[in-house]
Structures are given as structure tokens and as C-alpha cells.
Amino acid sequence: MKLFDPLGTGSSTVSYAGLIEKIEILRSTLRWAPKLERADIEKLLGQANTLRDEVMQLSRKERFVAAAEVEPPMPADAAAAAVPTARMRRQALIDRSFVFEGTFGDNPKLLAALEIAEKAAPTDLPVLIDGESGTGKELMAKVIHANGSRADKPFVSVNCGAIPENLLESELFGHKRGAFTGASSDRKGKFESAHLGTIFLDEIGELPLIGQVKLLRVLEAHEIQRVGSDERIAVDTRIVAATNRNLRRMSEEGQFREDLFYRLGVIHLTLPALRERRDEIPLLFSYFGDEAAEALKRRPIKMTPKLREFLLNYAYPGNIRELRNLIYRLSCLAGDVADIEHLPEDIRPQPATAGRFGAELGNGVDGTAAMPISLAEAKRAASDEAERTFLERGLQETGGTVAELARRCEMNRSHLQMLLKKHGIRSKDFRHRDDAGRAKDGK
Ligand SMILES: Nc1ncnc2c1ncn2[C@@H]1O[C@H](COP(=O)(O)OP(=O)(O)OP(=O)(O)O)[C@@H](O)[C@H]1O
Ligand SMILES: [Mg+2]
């Protein structure tokens, strides 16, 4: 029997129309099939799974586009100079069907990295990604893989810092049976497993010098030798490496081979730390809040003003990973509203120290608010809080209708949108719900 062809629409771009069409074809295959063999059922199940993954992908993309919708309009001077805004740059990537793999944000440095990734992806040039821990280096490596011609081939990740020195060669290049004690059978290494695909060499700065020499040889000759074997095996693997160390300085100090540094870093990307994109923190709360709600099958959490203030001021030494993990933790532990008590104990503010400014911020004397370090900061925090309360109350009263709120407070609508974005407030969360729980339209 002829089964539905999942690629039949001829497009890899996920769209509602495309998905509905695929689902309809799948349904009619099932409806008209006189009888299904087990093999057919398995095949259809596989196709249903693909469809489910595409729906998930679409929902991520939707969140991405939804966040872009509240972007402030292009400032007049930027328009005059024809400098593309973050929104235009991101939209251009979306229009070119760039695969973001869930990478979120419109910080100029992040967008620059994505634009370089887009150009580097279709080539086989090595890419070196650096940035602090948790800034998204592995995610960026996956973005490069997903946007290239090797996307349907393996992506093999190797943590160079986690392999003991005596096993390094065997891990990377494999070994022949009997090559050393314990080598009871022939074994492929990571490079062979990544043949035709991408190998991601994480924590490359931790690779011992002996490993660096061997890696350099692979980069030059595109072939490997398993430990204990004379046979040369050709490998066609795209190399993406990452580090949170300064490889240039390491190579100047003789800790990393300079020739390898230059070979790996033909294309060099640097990812910004979260402290360089603090203005995006509220957006990241919503983004990961929705993601966590989806994963945990619950409604997105709300935060008390105290918790929000703390999280807006927190330093995030672990960057986006830490922020994401915190939001997942809060989403898991809290009911509808998360508060300071749901934070991990080691980062929770101490009542004794925070008490001094708690009252000043209107957070009560239990002092669980983030600690402002100066009067100016305390004033800014108080004014932000007042602004936020004003916006939330206004949206409550207008049933989430931004245009109506703008009219009532005689404000420019796009300025209002910008303020909402700054606080990570979504007007749709304030739309009135009908009896069936559906949000009524309230543009
Ligand atoms: N821009 C981003 N948008 C969405 N999620 C992100 C972004 N950057 C990072 N993440 C998420 O943060 C987490 C950490 O990312 P990743 O593992 O890529 O960081 P890393 O730089 O490799 O960290 P490490 O140096 O500790 O290995 C992942 O869950 C990733 O999906
Ligand atoms: Mg990593």
C-alpha cells in the first residue's frame, strides 16, 4: 500500500498550513487503508512522531515571533541611517528559513554570532566558539550543524576536558582489538562516528598537548588511524570547537599550540555573557517560563514582585543556563505564583542583609528583595516597580487591550509596547477568558 510521504509538501519550512496538510494526508491514509500490517503501523507511527516534533518546533518558532511582535518601532535616527534594528535582523534570518534550534534573543552580539553562523554553516570551515560557561556554545554548534548540508548526518559531541589523557587517542580515533589491555574488540572513535557529519570538540582548551598534535594531523590530512592499527581511514568531518578560556593567550603562553589555534579558528564566534544583555532578562523569563510550562505540562508561573526584582538584579554567573535552570526549578516547585522561598538556598537573599532596604523598596521588612547597592539604584528599583504595577493594573482594567490602555493614559501605543517589553509583560495574559477558558480577543 502507498503510505503518506512526510516530505511530500516539498518544503522543510514548518508552517501551519503545511502541518495541517500533512495531518490530513495521514488521516486519510488511515481512513482508507483496508488493512494495516504491523510494518505499516510502525511506519505511520514514525510519521506521527515526526509531525509531533514539527508541531513542537512550530510552537518554539511562534514564541520567538511573538516576542518579536512587541519590539519597539525603529527610531527615527536609525531609520535615517538605514541601520537594521534587532527586529529586522532577526526577521531577516527567519525569512531566510534560518534554523535557530531554540536560540533566543536579539542582543546585537548574539545576532552577529547567528549571522556569522548562517554564513559559516554551508561551508566546511572550522568554527571556534568562545564565551563564558552557559552562554550557549553547544547550542550554537548545533545551530551551525542544523543550517548546513550535514544536518541529517551525525552531530557528535566530545568533551575534551573529561577524557583521561591515556584514553584520549582511543576515544577520538578508536582502537584495534588487543591494542592495549582492556581493548577486547575493535572500536570506532568519535571522528569515525562523526563521518559526514559534525564533530563538536567542547572544552578544547583542556585538550592536552599530545592530543593537540594528533588533532592537528587530522585537520591537515583528513584521515585517522585507530590505536594499534596501521590502516589510514579517511574521515570527512566538519569541526566545531568551543572553549571558555582565552585560547589566544594560552597559545602565547605556550599552553595551546598556536598552529592549532589558527586552524580551528578560521571562523571565530564569541557569545555574550548574560550581564551584557541584561535588558533581555525579562524576555528570557517569559521564553523559558513558557518552555518550562510546556515541558512540565502546567500553566506558566507568575512571580511575586520581590522574586522578580531579585531575579532582575541577580548576577547569573552561570549565564543563560543558570537562568533557564532557575525558571525550570520555579516552575516545578511553585504553584501559580513563585516567590523567593522557591529559589535554591545558596542564592536566596539573607533576611539580615536585605532587611535594610526592604522597606525602602516597598517589599516589607522581611527583606527578601534583591539588595540595591546605592540610593540611585534603590530609586530606580522603586520606580521600575511602580511602572510595572501601573502597567499590570492598566491591562487588568482594559482586559489586555494595549490600544485602549494607551488611549486612557494618553500614551503613544508603541512607547507603551516598549514598556511592556521592558518588563516582560504580555498583554495576552490579561485578556478576559470565556467560560471555556479561552482568551477573548483583545488586541
Ligand atoms: N540564546 C539562547 N536562547 C535559548 N536558550 C539558550 C541560549 N543560550 C543558551 N541557552 C540554553 O542554555 C543552556 C546552556 O547552553 P549550552 O550548553 O549551549 O552552553 P555552553 O556555553 O556550552 O555551556 P558550558 O560552557 O558550561 O558547557 C542550554 O539549555 C541552552 O539550550
Ligand atoms: Mg558546553
Image: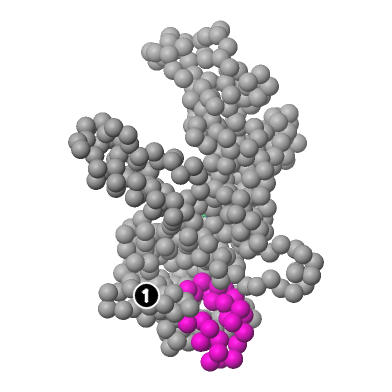
Instruction: Give the percent coordinates (x, y) of residue 156.
Output: 50, 33
Q: Which residue is mark 1?
A: 439
* 334 displayed left or right of 287: left
Instruction: Give the percent coordinates (x, y) of residue 145.
Output: 56, 39
Which secondary structure lies at badge 1?
Answer: loop
174 versus 410 height, above or below? above
Instruction: Give the percent coordinates (x, y) of residue 144.
Output: 58, 41
410 versus 116 height, above or below? below
Determine the image quadrant of residue 245: top right
Q: Which residue: 29% across, 32% down?
A: 1
Q: Which residue: 26% across, 31% down?
A: 39
Residue 405 on the magenta segment: yes
Q: Which residue: 34% across, 46% down?
A: 25
Along the viewing direction, whichever of 403 and 6 lies nearer the viewer: 6
User: Dot 1, crowdedness within 10 Å: few (<14), some or many (≥20)?
Assistant: some
Q: What residue span does the magenta drawing correspond to?
A: 401-426
Residue 331 on the magenta segment: no
* 95 displayed left or right of 352: right
Prevailing secondary structure class for the magenta stretch in the rendered image: helix
Tag count: 1
